[in-house]
Amino acid sequence: MKMPEHYESDLLFFFDGRPSELSLYHALFRHLNAMFLQASVRVQKSQISFYGRHLFAMVSLPRRKRDRGIVVTFGLARRLASPRITMAVEPYPNRWTHHVSVSEEQQMDEELLGWLQEAWDFSEQK
């Protein structure tokens, strides 16, 4: 995966004081790095964005500081019906944004990784 020059320092700043969330992110990154060799990643102020031709997934921290874990966000052409989806919105017709809270590495399973693969495929078709 392509990373900008200051990726590591930006990552440490993003997760400052949240070592368990950084550990979760590293676990997810390992999966994404293996799945999407041509992707790139960029750390921004409020999220970490993953791109192919277009943005396909993001990682952010929960809005409330007392909540633990990371939030994985991705876009699909359909709305998922799963109790794991904490929120789904349709900002454009047939473009659904889904949010999944991840608090344990075991939650990075076939189902979540399958959704991320579908998000990649969807973003590459735009």
Image (tube, helix red, strand yellow):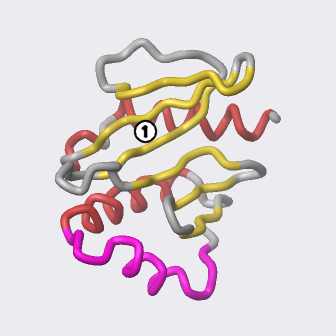
Residue in view at x 30 percent, y 37 percent: 109
Pinpoint residue 115: horizontal percent, then vertical percent: 49, 31
Given residues 5 and 92, the one toward you in this image is 92
Residue stretch rendered in magenta on the structure: 3-19
Amino acid type at mark 1 = Leu
Q: Nearer the viewer, residue 52 or 80?
A: 80
The N terminus appears in which quarter of the rendering? bottom right
Q: Residue at x 24, y 52 (%)?
A: 69
Residue 57 x %, y %: 55, 46
In which quadrant of the rendered image does the C terminus lie? Answer: top right
Whether residue 33 sits left or right of residue 40 in the image: it is left
Q: Residue at x 43, y 76 (%)?
A: 11
Q: Is residue 16 magenta?
A: yes
At numbered mark 1, what does the secondary structure look like: helix, strand or loop? Answer: helix
* x and y, in percent, of residue 72 in the image: 42, 44
Q: Which residue is mark 1?
A: 113
Q: Quadrant of residue 81?
A: top left
The image shows residue 101 at horizontal and vertical percentages of 31, 39
- Residue sitting at x 23%, y 75%: 17
Would you place residue 72 above or below residue 43 in this image? above
Q: Is residue 19 left or right of residue 7?
A: left
